[in-house]
């Protein structure tokens, strides 16, 4: 892996030490510079679980991806940089209940003697920094906060929660001791691309975090959240590619 090119993609230059401060810098750079997006899925371009192909897409071609790509490639970067990193599966909470079991890939990092959840592939609600497994609440730049606590429904499970004002939402549950390889996600990886139950193969989506909020393009609707201010506008079909390029730095190849 070309670590220099990856770090340049994250806007990071300077000393590299496997510390919590550096991990925070890496995660923040990732979620504010590399979008979550499903454009290949809706365009019927097959995704890959291979690190070299993910690197070509995300670093060389300056694209984003879904969790298997973003957290998959970030896992390899952390390992190359000397972090103690493992991978596990999470089950996402939706408005209709819990989604397909273990369909979200996340990373666990042990650094400076403590364990952290490190996720760069959860779209607009992705944490900007590592979240400790101790239950300590981590305040986010947009005014919200994250915490991890034991999941009452099953022994050994933990749940990631996000607080916004008086609202506290469960985002996903996971078992940090269930170590996974990226190839173990193959079935849900294929479901995400081609399954009827998938939420990611219906309309184009791109999401990225900013310093104080997030920007979401969902089909032809653009939502910008900046601190407590939220705006929403419709994007004309002819402006879709321009918005991708101007806001998400995504330049799609011309349709043949």
Image (cartoon, helix red, strand yellow):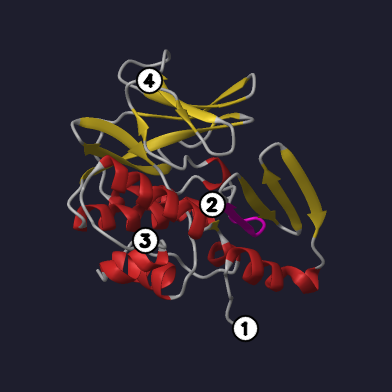
User: Mark 1 sits on what residue?
Assistant: 254
Magenta residues, start to end: 201-209
First-in-chain label (3 vs 2): 3
First-in-chain label (2 vs 4): 4
Q: CA distance from mark 3 to mark 1?
A: 31 Å
**Residue 173 higher or lower than 35, as above or below:** above
Residue 24, horizontal then vertical, whole percent: 36, 44
User: Mark 3 sits on what residue?
Assistant: 12
First-in-chain label (4 vs 1): 4
Q: Residue at x 59, y 38 (%)?
A: 142
Q: Residue at x 40, y 58 (%)?
A: 69
Question: Nearer the observer, disc 3 or disc 4?
Answer: 3
State yes or no: residue 230 in magenta.
Answer: no
Q: CA distance from mark 3 to mark 2?
A: 37 Å
Q: Secondary structure at mark 2?
A: loop
Question: Nearer the observer, disc 3 or disc 1?
Answer: 3
**Residue 216 higher or lower than 151, as above or below:** below
Discs 3, 4 touching: Cβ within 8 Å: no
Residue 135 disc label: 4
Q: CA distance from mark 3 to mark 4?
A: 29 Å
Question: Nearer the observer, disc 4 or disc 1?
Answer: 4
Residue 145, horizontal then vertical, whole percent: 52, 29
Residue 236 disc label: none
Question: Which image quarter holds the C terminus?
Answer: bottom right
User: Mark 2 sits on what residue?
Assistant: 195
First-in-chain label (3 vs 1): 3
First-in-chain label (2 vs 1): 2
- Left or right of 121? Residue 39 is right
Q: Secondary structure at mark 1?
A: loop
Q: CA distance from mark 2 to mark 1?
A: 26 Å
């Amino acid at each position: 892996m070309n670590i220099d090119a990856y770090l340049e993609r994250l806007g990071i230059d300077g000393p590299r030490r496997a510390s919590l401060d550096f991990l925070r810098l890496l995660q923040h750079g990732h979620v504010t510079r590399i979008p979550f997006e499903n454009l290949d899925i809706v365009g019927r371009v097959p995704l890959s679980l291979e690190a070299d192909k993910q690197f070509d897409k995300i670093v060389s071609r300056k694209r984003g991806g879904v969790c298997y790509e973003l957290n998959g490639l970030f896992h390899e970067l952390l390992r190359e940089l000397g972090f103690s990193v493992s991978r596990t599966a999470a089950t996402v909470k939706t408005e209709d209940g819990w989604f397909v079991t273990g369909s979200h890939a996340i990373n666990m990092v042990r650094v400076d003697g403590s364990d952290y959840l490190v996720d760069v592939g959860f779209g607009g609600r992705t944490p900007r920094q590592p979240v400790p497994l101790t239950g300590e609440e981590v305040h986010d730049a947009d005014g919200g906060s994250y915490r991890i606590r034991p999941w009452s429904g099953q022994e050994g499970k933990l749940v990631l929660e996000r607080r916004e004002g008086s609202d506290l939402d469960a985002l996903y549950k996971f078992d940090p001791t269930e170590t996974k390889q990226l190839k173990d996600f193959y079935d849900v990886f294929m479901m995400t691309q081609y399954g009827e139950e998938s939420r990611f193969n219906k309309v184009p989506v791109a999401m990225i975090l900013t310093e104080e909020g997030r920007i979401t393009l969902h089909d032809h609707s653009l939502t910008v959240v900046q601190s407590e201010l939220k705006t929403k506008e419709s994007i004309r079909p002819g402006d879709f590619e321009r918005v991708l390029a101007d806001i998400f730095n995504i330049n799609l190849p011309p349709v043949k």
